[in-house]
Image (cartoon, rainbow, N blue to C red):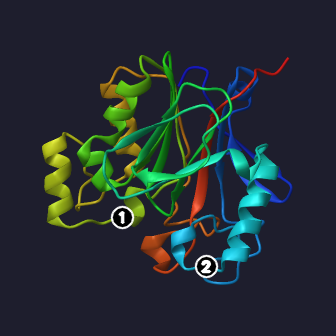
Amino acid sequence: MAGTSLTKQTCAGIGVLTDVGARSAGILVAFTDRHGGVSAPPYDSLNLGARSGDDRLSLSENRRRAGRAIGFGAHALTLARQVHGAEIIEVSSGHSGAVGDADGLVTRAVGPVLGILTADCAAVIVAGERGLGILHAGWRGLAAGVIGRGVDAVGPIRQAWIGPCIRACCYEVGPDVVAAFDEAGLPVAPGGRVDISRAAVATLERAGISDIAASDDCTGCSPSYFSYRREGRTGRQGAFAALVEPSR
């Protein structure tokens, strides 16, 4: 898929999927796995989700470690209260911390780090002519059109990245999800199975975007990732995006 790519790296003991070329061009893209943190089971070990039930001190240390590995300070991070919808919030220069209920963050400013937390849903990052966006795309968000709203907010889109998420091999759904996907024109595999990554790619391609990098990893299969479907009570991995100064 054109020039966009994702490469696995280990940074300060933390596994990160990143696009080195994008960083050189002024776009930070990073998806963490669950390794390299301090949280005890069932949040072991790099849990980044505050609403998971994990110890607050462990969470704070995990976020500090993730920021150090990826290259940002905790003071620059903005997170939404994710509600499995399609609301988008714009983050201005100098903002950090929590914002309201939303499943997408966009910015036109250099500096703010946008974050999404997942444990089977996809984190989708889109870079366009009018800024950068990061989207939380589970089945509800996909059916509600969160990706389309994010694309509209920062497009025309030049590049997109999709992080590790649950695939059809591990995600058999009920008739309500099948009906919602059918209504939204999203693909459903035989046997009522949903591939969140495939649905996200289909949505992006329908919007005319071809330069897409998608992780091959399934969070339901791989013990390297938190999976709500597999584990129930568990942590959250992070996805991060920011406009930064291009490397020279």
The C terminus sits in image quarter: top right
Residue under label 1, please give it. 171
The disc, 1 or 2, on the residue closer to the chain's N-terminal end is 2
Helix, strand, or loop for circle 2?
loop
Q: Label 1 is placed on what type of residue?
A: Tyr
**Residue 119 at x, y percent in the picture:** 50, 64
* Point 40% across, 36% down: residue: 201
Q: Nearer the viewer, residue 7 or 106?
A: 106
**Residue 142 at x, y percent in the picture:** 31, 46
* Point 66% across, 80% down: residue: 55
> Which of labels 1 and 2 is toward the front?
2
How far is disc 1 from disc 2 in space, using C-alphas?
Answer: 26 Å
For this orientation, the residue located farthest to the bottom is: 41
Q: Label 2 is placed on what type of residue?
A: Asp
Which quadrant holds residue 198? top left
The disc placed on residue 54 is 2
